[in-house]
Image (cartoon, helix red, strand yellow):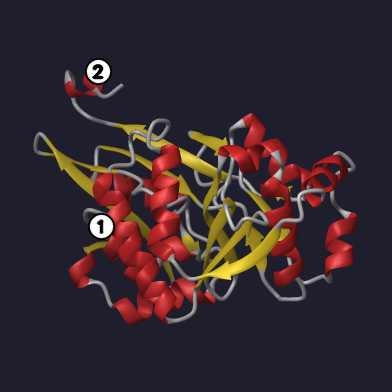
Amino acid sequence: MYQIKILSSSEIDIFKWDNCVQENSNGLIYAYSFYLNTMAENWHGLIINDYEAIFPIPVKNKLGIQYAYMPAFTQQLGLIGNVKINNTKLINAIHSFLKYGSINLNFSNKNFTEKIVEKNNFIIDLKNNYSVIQEKYKKTIAYSLSKAAKHHFIYTKDDDIKKAVALYKLYNQNNMPHVIDIDYTNLKKLLLQLQKNNNVLVRKVENEKQELMSIALLMKDIKRYYNILNTTTEAGRKTEANYFLYNNILQELCNQNMLFDFEGSDLPGVKKFYEKFGAINQPYFNWHFNNLPIPFKWLKK
């Protein structure tokens, strides 16, 4: 017999919640209380028994209707924990709480419901040494790495989070209109929190004139490095600097019991780029539901 309850973030036992995220393989960085507190407008948590399993539910309110949504820079949430429970009970509990929502379920939630859409996410196991990781590179990557090598790029560490975020915003604001200023402000707050515990890495590639070609910002927990931000300048794109960057990152981070999480993507060009590094697809799943009464249901269709 399972007890299911949905609590507001202020009612949740944060220690037990975060412990559930940390102790389960499907608990990713996005589900920690500090992440949700920073990135979500508001959030609740579905809890099974004494935090045996949890399900984060970020919520917003519009026209008096509360609905589930995915905050910016939050890839996947869903059911966390290892419990054998009838998912229909969980779905009914969520539907009784919310009539509308779109939630990204984590990689282990494939059978949560039939009404889900698969999304790409590529990962590399870092437990091997660099030569083993490199052996899994696609043959087509050789040209790009060879082209980049001709430019005598310099791979360096950095700690300027604000610059990395500003560059990402500058290069992506037109094709990511749903990410607004407050999201970037919240992201900087989150990253500064993580940086205090050495859980942020900034790596960049410069040319011989110390001009920036490409930069990546990674978040870190005890399971994964998360490729949260990546920006390549126009000059960097022409010289394949991003290949040079990630090749060096993988060389630096290998031999750890960790995963490198590319954080996507469904975009064909980005997907192909990740696959060239031998990354395997560990998909996550979007669950959209609309049980609003007519005519609201039609308006939100």
| Position in image of residue 52 (x %, y %) | 44, 73
Drawn side of residue 151 relative to residue 55, left or right? right
Q: Kindly indicate whether the residue at mark 2 contacts the one at mark 1 (C-beta within 8 angstroms).
A: no
- Residue drawn at x 80%, y 42% is 144
What residue do we see at 18% from left, 70% from top?
A: 10
Q: Position of residue 281 (x, y in %)?
A: 69, 46
Q: Name the residue rendered at 69%, 56% in the picture.
A: 246
Q: Is residue 198 above or below residue 185?
A: below
Label 2, residues with CA under 10 Å away: few <14, some 14-19, many ≥20: few
Q: Is residue 248 left or right of residue 110?
A: right
Q: Quadrant of residue 238?
A: top right
Residue linked to disc 2: 298
The answer for how far apart the CA atoms under marks 1 and 2 are is 26 Å
Q: Residue furthest left?
A: 64
Answer with mark 1 or mark 2, whichever residue precedes in sequence. Answer: 1
Q: Is 239 positioned to the left or the right of 261 in the image?
A: right
